[in-house]
Image: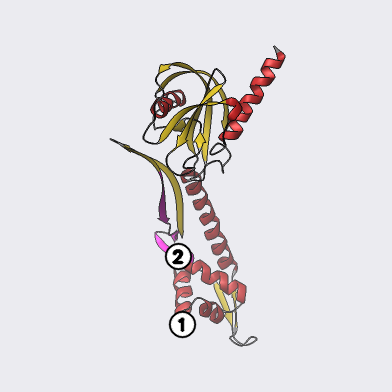
């Protein structure tokens, strides 16, 4: 049983800084054991399942590409370990005779798939996790600081400055660091604006972004290896990458509502 998980990984060393998608492939081979002896894996479970489905050991063996003799030997091996009959075969009736699972066989098959299900779920929960990111909103004199992306995804499009949180880093530290790296500007946090978590917001994989409203401390606007930094008029906003258009729209709506109340 193979499981493939996709992860977003940031590679950063010297002058190279890139977020890439990698795949981790795990080959799980679940085995049900009794007293340390292997009774059933996915192949043997499938054989019992097909016997139950077809009512025939011969047809079950044929569908799995094995001989009747080999299939019967597999059944006998399991029965020797369990100490009970798992399959009963009766001659006559059908063309190849009839085979049915005993109560012990039914119980063993159910136990295997139950354990298999409980084993798969934790692996998926532990490995399929969203990546954490931050984005920053910096508005000065009706202009917003944006970056134009040099690389995919969304090459050539504008976006809010921000990036992936590094291990051991606070969200607040991440947005200040990313803003400096991408724009050359020193900023301080005014408030947390919101959290955006649509699983489809980033084509590279599921990301969750904490969005901060910032104020300017200093620095000089400059480009990075990954982006071009620009001041853009709020009245002439271009189409933005990811879900940043929605984020900016939400920010402007909230700002207008706040001004109308004052």
Q: Is residue 160 magenta?
A: no
Residue 42 sits above or below residue 3 on the image: below
- Percent across and percent down for residue 79 are 48, 70
Q: Disc 2 on helix, strand or loop?
A: strand
Relative height, residue 256 to residue 246 (above, below): above
In magenta, the rendered stretch is 20-42
Q: Secondary structure at mark 1?
A: helix
Q: Quadrant location of residue 105?
A: bottom right
Residue 190 image position (x, y, % from top left): 52, 17
What label sits on residue 55 in the rendered view?
none
Residue 2, above or below 180: below
Residue shown at the point (60%, 84%) measured from the top left: 97
Which residue, given by chain and number where applicable, does mark 1 sit on?
Answer: 69
Place of residue 56 in the rendered image (x, y in percent of width and height, measured from the top left): 58, 79
Q: Main secondary structure of the magenta part?
A: strand
Q: According to the image, label 2 marks what residue? A: 39
Q: Nearer the viewer, residue 112 or 125?
A: 125
């Amino acid at each position: 049983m193979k499981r493939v998980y996709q992860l977003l990984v940031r590679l950063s060393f010297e002058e190279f800084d890139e977020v890439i998608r990698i795949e981790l492939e795990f080959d799980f081979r679940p085995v049900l054991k009794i007293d340390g002896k292997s009774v059933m894996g996915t192949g043997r479970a499938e054989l019992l399942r097909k016997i139950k489905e077809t009512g025939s050991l011969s047809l079950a063996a044929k569908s799995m590409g094995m001989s009747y003799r080999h299939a019967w030997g597999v059944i006998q091996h399991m029965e020797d370990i369990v100490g009970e009959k798992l399959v009963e075969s009766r001659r006559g009736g059908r063309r190849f005779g009839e085979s049915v699972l005993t109560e012990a066989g039914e119980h063993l098959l159910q136990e295997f798939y139950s354990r298999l299900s409980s084993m798969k779920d934790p692996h998926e929960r532990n490995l399929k996790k969203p990546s954490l990111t931050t984005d920053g909103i910096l508005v000065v004199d009706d202009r917003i600081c944006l970056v134009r992306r040099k690389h995919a995804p969304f090459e050539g499009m504008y976006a809010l400055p921000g990036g992936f949180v590094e291990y051991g880093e606070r969200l607040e530290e991440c947005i200040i660091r990313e803003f400096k790296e991408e724009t050359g500007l020193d900023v301080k946090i005014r408030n947390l604006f919101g959290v955006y978590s649509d699983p489809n917001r980033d084509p590279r994989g599921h990301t969750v972004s904490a969005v901060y409203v910032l104020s300017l401390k200093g620095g000089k606007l400059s480009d990075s290896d990954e982006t071009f930094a620009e001041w853009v008029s709020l009245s002439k906003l271009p189409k933005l990458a990811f879900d940043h258009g929605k984020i900016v729209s939400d920010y402007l709506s909230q700002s207008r509502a706040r001004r109308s109340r004052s």
